[in-house]
Amino acid sequence: MVEVGLVMGSTSDWEVMQNAARQLQAFGISFEARVVSAHRTPDLLFEYAATAASRGLKCIIAGAGGAAHLPGMLASKTALPVLGVPVPSKYLRGEDSLLSIVQMPKGIPVATFAIGEAGAANAALFAIAMLATDRPELAAKLAEFRSVQTESVLAMTLPELE
Ligand code: RP5
């Protein structure tokens, strides 16, 4: 059964959002990647969000750029946690996407991550952390991931002065 919905407003978001896909894949999380646009395919958006919980999804990671209302609109139609990823935009470099996603009015939350690749990867890690709360084997994998990351930073050295 698919556990995580990974949706984005356009195929042009995939370059960024595949950082979430890679992370989910690395942890063996089943996910579906789909293009669902708030303004170009609003009926699909409603249907996707309205049926997400009954299809067994545990959360939705949604990436969008510009007037990025996809995560907020999804959150308005499902009680599942929605994790929003601001995708960099052409003219405002994703600051527009970030503000669109993070500034949800009180009552309908969207967990908002950093602009771009780091945000996409972290949204996936956050989804994994949520799933791991009642799955000890997944929690162990996450602990191992963090420990490897810590070791790699501890092993870093700086270059000699030039
Ligand atoms: C948003 O508009 C998408 O999420 C994308 O980031 C942005 C541009 O879409 P395209 O014009 O590249 O399809 O809906």
Image (cartoon, rainbow, N blue to C red):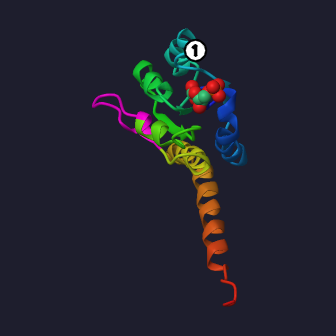
Instruction: Please say if 18 is above or below 108.
Output: below
- Depicted 56 relative to depicted 156: above or below: above
Q: Based on the displayed image, in which of its 4 quarters is residue 60 positioned?
A: top right
Label the magenta part by its dominant secondary structure. loop
Q: Residue at x 62, y 74 (%)?
A: 153
Where does residue 63 sit, x and y in percent of width and height?
56, 34
Return the residue found at the far front.
Answer: 91
From the viewer's perspective, is residue 45 above or below residue 1? above
Magenta-span inclusion, residue 103: yes
Q: Quadrant of ligand 1?
A: top right
Q: For the residue with label 1, is its CB less than 8 Å from the closest atom of ligand 1?
A: yes
**Residue at horizontal 54%, vertical 21%?**
52
- x 65%, y 34%: residue: 13
Q: In which quadrant of the rendered image does the C terminus lie?
A: bottom right
Magenta-tinted stretch = 100-112
* The magenta stretch spans residue 120: no
Residue 91's quadrant in the figure?
A: top right
Image location (x, y in percent) of residue 129: 53, 48
Please say whether residue 7 is visible from this viewpoint. Answer: no
Query: Which SS class for mark 1?
Result: loop
Question: Left or right: where does residue 98 sit relative to residue 61?
Answer: left
The residue at the point 50 percent across, 48 percent down is 114
Label 1 Cα crowd, 10 Å radius (few <14 / some 14-19 / many 20+): few
The image quadrant that residue 24 belongs to is top right
| Residue type (three-letter) at the residue carrying disc 1 | Arg
Q: Is residue 32 left or right of residue 41?
A: right
Outermost residue on the left side: it is 106
Residue highlighted by disc 1: 40
Most distant residue in the bottom direction: 161
Position of the N terminus, as image quadrant, is: top right
How many marks can you see? Answer: 1
